[in-house]
Image: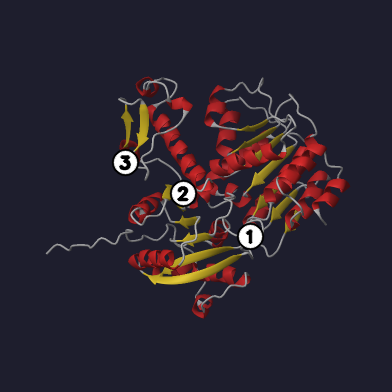
Amino acid sequence: MNMSLVLNRYKCRRYLVRNLAELGFKEPTPIQRQAIPLLLSGRECFACAPTGSGKTLAFVFPILMKLKHASKDGVRAVILCPTRELAAQTARECKRLAKGKKFYIKLLTKQLVKGADFSKLPCDILISTPFRVHVAIRKRKLDLSRVEYLILDESDKLFELGLVKQVDSVVKACSNPAIVRSLFSATLPDSVQELARSIMHDAIRVVVGTKNSASEFVKQKLIFAGSEEGKLLALRQSFQESLNPPILIFVQNKERAKDLYNELKFEDIRADVVHADLSDVQDIQRIVLNTSKGIFTHLSAPLCRPIKSTAMRADPRSLAGSSQMSFESLLFDIFLIERENAVDNFRAGKTWLLIATDVIARGMDFKGVNCVINYDFPDSAAAYIHRIGRTGRAGRTGEAITLYTEADAPCLRNIANVMKASGCEVPDHALLLRKQKWKKHRPHREAISTKPVVEEQ
């Protein structure tokens, strides 16, 4: 079934036909064939499909079809995403698909929560992380009682302990009895399905391919590196053999992201770092207020570049002393801009290699990523599937290299099983290991460094 047949069957509106053609859509993917008719018929679903298979279009298209026209009667659709980056990307995709139609599509930001009067702000589709919506609800700024569609994107992540209470408050606030709720993800554990059933009514489960499987378009490889120093040597060797940017490298935490960047910055490779947060005091202390130039500079970032933001052009001393914005809050805003800059530079091809934590492992669609390297071993099969899913998207091929040491044995069999199910070669010993889980905390790893260690006598 090609896209034109789908459009004719559902009497697709002209602006959608035009936009789909401009965006190069010719044939619906398997998840789109299954999910679009369900949502258009008013059925709820929880859908599992491989990374890069077109899940965003599978829920945005029917929402735009059903909403028909812009309205000033309040929010009519809510899309929840686990990270700011994914929410921003989804908002961009919505706007591209709705081009030519005056729908009010809003990305819920901190500034919008603080300053907007939602009773007067037209909004058809609201896209956000659960936290931002939760804050707006708690402040009684946001009325979701007329919401017709609630989408939970990357639902397995949204139902983790840190987010589930915030998601629950959003679900309760969307009190329209006729609401259609749907969940989408590349991995759908049984625990998530149980939670999904508790908030949905007679939902249909849609699974494309093998549940919780990796993309068939990604060539996967395991490399035993022996030690942390061996991992660094293996990484450098892979660069010497074939450096085929753009490349994503995943590490365990932000400290290791910075350490790896410091090791690679003299390799004549355009690299950058993106990680999850700026919560510790040491990082805050490394940010200085450059009052002589009237700009802020983030010294802990690998590329000490000025922050380009209209919000930062005022006198920084007055901003820092403002009662409306605490200094810590301002620092965090600066950090978020740095993070967005790193992602944007990677998208634009200005950066060849992006070192990242799992903050961008889910849903992010980077065009043409040729290789994903798991420098630090993922702590679950789901994390592995989402990481390597940044390559091999929309039918393109990609490569995923995973480095491991003895410390990674507890999770090696899980990853090996995913690889085997995808048709990739796996060492026999990896499939014979006892199935285990990580301990409560991720393994402690030695520092990323090739500097010689001088032992005290």
Looking at the figure, which quarter contains the C terminus? bottom left
Say which label, 3 or 2, has the lower sequence index.
3
Q: Secondary structure at mark 3?
A: helix
* Quarter holding residue 382: bottom right
Q: Nearer the viewer, mark 3 or mark 2?
A: 2
In the picture, the disc for residue 282 is 3
Instruction: Please tell me how crowded label 2 is: few (under 14), some (14-19), or many (20+) other residues with Cα within 10 Å.
Output: many
Callout 3 amino acid: Gln
The residue under label 2 is 351
Q: Secondary structure at mark 2?
A: loop
Say which label, 1 or 2, has the lower sequence index.
2
Instruction: Please tell me how crowded label 3 is: few (under 14), some (14-19), or many (20+) other residues with Cα within 10 Å.
Output: few
Callout 2 amino acid: Thr
Q: How many marks?
A: 3
Say which label, 1 or 3, has the lower sequence index.
3
Residue 400 in percent (x, y) is at 53, 64
Looking at the figure, which quarter contains the N terminus? bottom right
Q: Is residue 181 visible?
A: no
